Image (spheres, grey):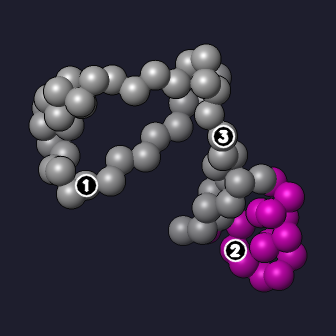
Amino acid sequence: MITVVSQVLKDSLVARGVEATKILVNPNGADPDVYAPIPADAKRALRQELGFTAGDHVIGCRHH
């Protein structure tokens, strides 16, 4: 799996022979009016509830 931040980058890789199905377009950035981290204790409880350990990395993206 290859992650790129724009369709232009994906198109460039496909033109170079990379299989399109192996490329995920995931635009970077965050809306500071929407992003609001939860308190540390609530974060620990949620991670535990979802089965994540302290060493797991969780990355998410919300599409509108």
Residue toward you, 37 or 59: 37
Q: Residues within 10 Å of mark 1 (few under 14, many from 20)?
A: few
Q: Residues within 10 Å of mark 2 (few under 14, many from 20)?
A: few
Picture coordinates of residue 24, whole percent (x, y): 63, 57
The Cα–Cα distance between marks 1 and 2, rounded to whole angstroms, is 29 Å
User: What residue span does the magenta drawing correspond to?
Assistant: 7-22
The Cα–Cα distance between marks 1 and 3, rounded to whole angstroms, is 22 Å
For badge 2, the amino acid type reads Glu
Determine whether, in the image, residue 3 is placed left or right of residue 9.
left
Specify the farthest residue to the top.
33
Determine whether, in the image, residue 33 is placed left or right of residue 46.
right
For badge 3, the amino acid type reads Gly
Label 3 sits on a secondary structure element that is loop
Please name the residue that numbered disc 1 is placed on: 56
Please name the residue that numbered disc 2 is placed on: 19
Q: Quadrant of the C terminus?
A: top right
Q: Quadrant of the N terminus?
A: bottom right
